Amino acid sequence: MAIKYEKLIPRFLGYVKQNTRSDENSTTIPSTERQTVFLKKLAAELEEIGLKDVKIRKVDSYLTAELPSNLDYNVPVLGLISHIDTADFNSEDIKPKIVENYDGKSVIKLDDAGEYTLDPKVFPSLTKYAGQTLITTSGDTLLGSDDKSGVAEIITTMEYLIAHPEIKHGKIKIGLGPDEEIGTGAKNFDVPDFGADFAYTVDGGPVGQLEYETFSAAGLKVHITGKDVHPSEAKGIMINSLTVAREFEDALPASEVPEQTDGRQGFFHLLEENGTVDHTDMSYIIRDFERDGLEARKNKVTEIVKQLNDKYGEGTVKIDMGDQYYNMIDVIKDHMDVVKIAEKAMKNLDIEPDEAPVRGGTDGSTISFKGLPTPNLFAGGENMHGRFEYVAEESMEKAVDVVLEIIKLNSENKK
């Protein structure tokens, strides 16, 4: 691989080895102390490479910093944002593996026993990476490319600009935040303090992704209280909360789940279920591209709850349900210039933009609704959130290329 960005991959490999998993059951900001530890390490790194105004903000725990303009005229202030937490999968003792010059067709053994593999027949995206260097997991953890690829790419971009002052650029603000994976990281994001006119999250998947339309999202917790008595005396008395939980799940549309939907189809996704006869808790996410569609799905849930409570008694089923983020297109449609500059940057580098709606969300969704238009750029990762995650070194390098090109284009946007 070219050494244009010689610290990019070593930086990424160092980052992923540090456990920064978030915790949706926590009430603190960040949700885990290990994220604070990592943010402090990053703050020291940013100061060392020469960024200014480096701070971890109390209001939202975002690490922010500034690269001052080297222009003698004003251009819009550009923001670059990524998140440091990883998803709800084992992230302890991550051991990334390097597969050099992958042939695009072989099965990659992740663990020594070969229990877990990356097989092009199962993961056809692998065929795109012939001749490239892949970074994979060792089979028992995730990798953390989501979004430590983005973190490494943004910091490497800043380091490159500082080392190459001949590259003209306006003021650049960076924000590295916690808790994106649990949907709370950007809720307190301080847009005025950040001080950017427009921004991008560097948090997407394969090369070319340019995302400005996302799901609208809600989270759902279902709490079912049963009535546990001895089975010999159960007739007409026992309420088995596990049975009620099964009825709740069966009342949802069976085909509207992630594994049976694609494109613009929404879904109900059961993430976790824990229970006994006495009590069962269920955790869902609800997704739809249209706001009306999200409301219809939430109404479906409340109808099911009413039906079950009518059957088993008031209070048998209780829910906590709330919106998490909305489709950013509602904001971005009025700021398409932000999309256009990213499109031009990619095309200048012979990268075809992939602008399909993202079946997920980013912090950019929430931040856009706070008044800062923030589409999402690719960071390179594939199969994110699990043991089959991988990223190509070349993809990460191209992500830096695109961010640099956006910065160069913005330098021409004289106010």
Image (spheres, rainbow, N blue to C red):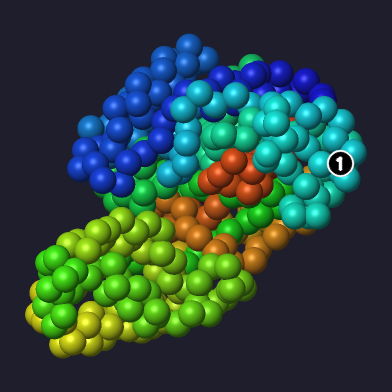
Residue farthest to the front? 232
Q: Nearer the viewer, residue 52 or 149?
A: 149
Q: Nearer the viewer, residue 292 or 347?
A: 292
Q: Residue at x 23, y 68 (%)?
A: 241
Q: Amino acid at mark 1?
A: Ser
Task: Give the residue number, with chain letter if any, for mark 1.
Answer: 106
Estimate the x, y position of residue 93 in percent, counting from the top left.
Answer: 50, 23
Left or right of residue 197: residue 391: right
Q: Quadrant of residue 175?
A: top left
In the rendered view, tell whether residue 21 sits above or below residue 328. above
The reply to whether residue 401 is visible in this rendering is no
Q: Secondary structure beneath disc 1? A: loop
Figure quadrant of the N terminus:
top right
The reply to whether residue 207 is visible in this rendering is yes
Q: Residue at x 36, y 49 (%)?
A: 182
Estimate the x, y position of residue 239 in percent, counting from the top left.
Answer: 18, 74
Q: Residue at x 64, y 66 (%)?
A: 356
Estimate the x, y position of residue 47 in percent, counting from the top left.
Answer: 44, 15
Left or right of residue 344: residue 106: right
Q: Residue at x 50, y 60 (%)?
A: 360
In the rendered view, tell whether residue 165 sits above or below residue 217. above
Estimate the x, y position of residue 412 in percent, counting from the top left.
Answer: 64, 44
Left or right of residue 279: residue 351: right
Q: Nearer the viewer, residue 84 or 196?
A: 84
Left or right of residue 415: residue 314: left
